[in-house]
Image (cartoon, rainbow, N blue to C red):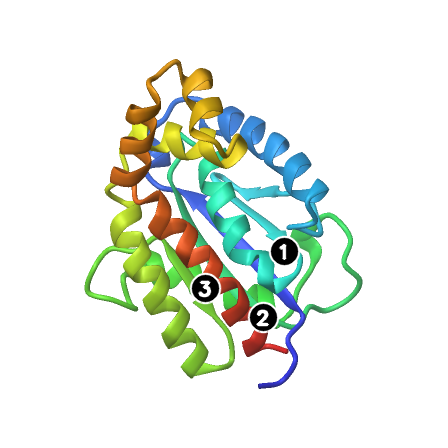
Amino acid sequence: MASLTHAVLIADVVGSRSRRNIRELLSARLTAASRRHLRRRWIRLPYSVTAGDEFQTVTGPLRSLPELLLDLRVALRPLNLRIGIGLGGITGPLRPPVNRLDGEAFHNARRAIDSIKRGRRHRFETVTAFESRHERFDRTINLIYGLQDTLLLKITPKQWDAIKSFLRHPTLERSAKRLRLAESTVSRNLKRGYYWQLIETVNVAGPLIESAFR
């Protein structure tokens, strides 16, 4: 495949019309997520709310995309996200504001998130989609994330709490103390919340994306 060095993320909030003060909550969550993700070099520009409940960024290394997607979902809880990833070129220098940038990656990201809203890719509900110029890659990565989304949509708030704590403090002892729960309860919530399946997706999808566009 040809070298594609950029990935654009466009996301919005599922059911945002039913939430009060959605703009304020989204802005606060994104400010914290931007600091964390810029520090880890998972994104190249801060997240920017571009319309209503929608926000965008240009991501960092392709290999880190799956880590970013999982961490972003955790960081923005209790908000549930639809996320479209577009792979391709970007016109002009990478500098804010992100809504003034353009190029293939942005157009593909828009097609990706629109495909989620219209339910075009699968006959089951999904909240993640990738779009590039390479059909074989798109079919593979969207199948992986489509199957993951089937599990992700079943995760309860308590299970998300366990996932967030364990991602930040990856021992049962520390997570249990932070959550004020027994270690066995945290372990059970991680298992029932499909934590290990989510992590396996990160481990497999990262190298797959990187090698596809090397």
Q: Position of residue 121 (x, y in %)?
A: 30, 68
Q: Which residue is mark 2?
A: 210
Q: Give whichever of 19, 173 is nearer the camera.
A: 173
Picture quadrant where residue 1 is located? bottom right
* Tag 2: amino acid: Glu
Q: Nearer the viewer, mark 2 or mark 1?
A: 2
Q: Residue at x 35, y 65 (%)?
A: 144
Q: Which residue is mark 1?
A: 59
Q: CA distance from mark 3 to mark 1?
A: 19 Å
Dot 2 or dot 1: first in sequence order is: 1
* Tag 1: amino acid: Thr
**Helix, strand or loop under label 3:** helix
Residue that lies at the very extreme toward the left in this rendered image: 123
Q: Which residue is mark 3?
A: 204
181 sits left or right of 52 in the view: left
212 sits left or right of 177 in the view: right
Q: How many marks?
A: 3
Q: Are marks 2 and 3 in contact (CB under 8 Å)?
A: no
Q: Residue at x 60, y 64 (%)?
A: 62
